[in-house]
Amino acid sequence: MKRTALIGIIVLSSLACLWLLLAWLSKTETTYQPTDTNSTPSVPTAVYQPHSFTAGEVATYKIKIAGITVGKCTFRADLLDENGTAQWRFTLKGGAAGGLVRYDSTSIVNASFNHSISYHTVQKDAASRTVTLAFDEKNLKVKRRLNGNSDGEADTQPNTLDPISVIFKFRELNLINPGTLTTHVSDGKGTFPVKVNVVGPQKIEIGNREFDAILVEPDLGNLRGVFNKDPEAKLQIWLSAQADRVPLRIRTKIGRGNFITELEDYTRPE
């Protein structure tokens, strides 16, 4: 009897060990790491598909005063991959008066093309300076630095752009019918609506060629600098009537002077 009981115990122990072995061999390994259920997962932002401009396009212009070429400037648009995050970059590089006047500006905008991330400009002229803007889209703030030093903070609005990227925004607006359109722009000292008056279609000549264009007149009355100091300052932009809406001519009237910027060369990736 004892022998039978002992054999039973051994058999049961063996079966238990076999069951434990089979259970161990069938265990699933996982790399799942529990996360805080209150946190929001990161969702990639959709990249804006522009109607007019495109990544890689370059437009070069001649700057004229009284019909005489005094300098050149170049606008460029690029789509960057910043550590796996898409960003739009817009640049403006220009010079005049044999290099005595230089302007180098870079704008970084989110992938959705509805809010600036940063803006940096180096200006060399009678009032040389460096300005940097750091935008906080979540808290609707922008911090400004002048020549490397803190220069205050301003409130922004949803869909706020900087002085360079807003030019590309003009090209994306519906300009078929004359009227007034509004967007927001910030120079780091304040944020305000920029009203764009669509005058309508016009024909212009550049060199020996005639172009169909659409004239728009942005109201930059609140913008710092010459536009704020001169109540009669005026900005006019003739955009191509074609789908690319390339600025063909830009005229800036300040006091008694007129600065004319005309398109010299335009390249667009296939």
Image (cartoon, rainbow, N blue to C red):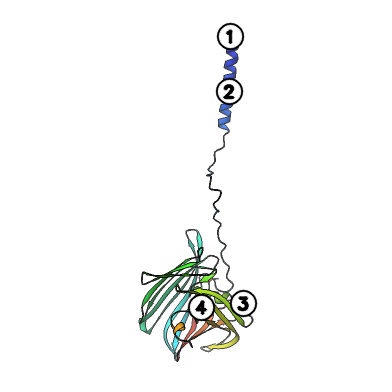
Dot placed on the residue nearer the N-terminal end, 3 or 4:
3
* Residues at marks 3 and 2, CA–CA distance in whole angstroms: 77 Å
* Residues at marks 1 and 4, CA–CA distance in whole angstroms: 100 Å
Name the residue carrying label 3.
Answer: 174
Residue 166 placed where, x, y %? 52, 75
Amino acid type of the residue tagged 2 in the rendering:
Ala
The nearer-to-camera label among 1 and 4 is 1
Residue 162 placed where, x, y %? 48, 73
Dot placed on the residue nearer the N-terminal end, 2 or 1:
1
Name the residue carrying label 1.
Answer: 3
Amino acid type of the residue tagged 3 in the rendering:
Asn
> Which one is nearer the viewer's eye here, 21 or 33?
33
Q: Residue furthest top?
A: 1
Residue occupying image coordinates x 55% and y 75%: 183
Name the residue carrying label 4.
Answer: 266
Name the residue carrying label 2.
Answer: 16
SS type, badge 1? helix
Residue occupying image coordinates x 57% and y 77%: 182
Is disc 1 surrounded by few (<14), some (14 to 19) or many (20+) residues within 10 Å?
few
Dot placed on the residue nearer the N-terminal end, 1 or 4:
1
Vertical comparison of 133 with 236: above or below: above
Amino acid type of the residue tagged 4 in the rendering:
Tyr
Residue 124 placed where, x, y %? 37, 78
Look at the image and tell me in which quarter the C terminus lies: bottom right
SS type, badge 3? loop
